[in-house]
Image (cartoon, helix red, strand yellow):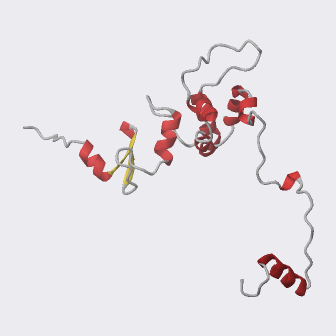
Amino acid sequence: MDSGTSRPARAQETAHSMGQQKRRLGPIPEAHIKRQKFQENPPTATMPAQVWQQIFQYLPPETLAQLVWVNHAFKDYLTNDEWDYSSRPLDGASQFMNPEHIWATSRSIYHPSLPKALAGCKELQMWGLIKGKNCCLCGSRQHVMVIWPFAVRLCVDCLGKQTQSVSMEPS
């Protein structure tokens, strides 16, 4: 270093010459710690799935779509159709909800003007059609539209490649 003094010493001299005094840092209060370690089980593991599902049905579909990506448990609670929804747990807890019911309840609360899911289409798929921006085949974002009778979102190029013209004129 040019002046022969170390960087912390110069900073202390500068702070002192400006009338500032350095404070001695004591132990950092726990409220100020940015990152807290979870106990062995994160909160998602300690609350029953049925409780999470009860909460989820009152959240907006936009939030549900984000929660699908939070962890495997949430994804299962919101998309798994393979659970046995008819059997009641022995411990007296409420039964699992069908994810379709969660999505339908959320849609009817937050977007009552949106139509119900098309026949053969799940609520999550409908939400993807309505809110998605990419072509389902090539991923393009240019000139994309939903083709409702086929429940698919396509760009103009893919639509042209996937369809045939049919002449209605008599031969």
Place residue 141 in its image quadrant. Answer: bottom left
Left or right: 128 with respect to 73?
A: left
Seen in the picture, residue 39 relative to 90 is either above or below; the reply is below
Q: Nearer the viewer, residue 105 or 61?
A: 61
Residue 33 is left or right of residue 45, and the answer is right
> Number of marks in the image?
0
Q: Residue at x 49, y 42 (%)?
A: 128
Q: Is residue 45 above or below residue 2?
A: above
Q: Quadrant of the N terminus?
A: bottom right
Q: Is residue 116 visible?
A: no
Q: Quarter of the image for the C terminus: give it.
A: top left
The answer to whether 15 appears left or right of 119 in the picture is right
- Judged from this view, the residue extending furthest toward the front is 4
Q: Quadrant of residue 108?
A: top right
Using the image as rendered, state which of residue 71 and residue 104 is in the foreground.
71
Q: From what the image shows, is residue 79 above or below residue 5?
A: above
Query: Can residue 142 be seen from the camera position used here?
Result: yes
* Residue 37 x/y as whole percent: 77, 44
The residue sitting at the left extreme is: 171
Which residue corresponds to the image point at 48% horizontal and 45% vertical from the top-left? 130
Closer to the camera in the image, 26 or 48: 26
Which x, y percent locates residue 8? 81, 76
Instruction: Give residue 119's quadrant in the image.
Output: top left
Q: In screen coordinates, is 120 left or right of 162?
A: right
The residue nearer to you, when weighing 7 against 45, is: 7
Q: Position of residue 152 (x, y in %)?
A: 39, 41
Where does residue 82 sit, x and y in percent of width and height?
A: 54, 21
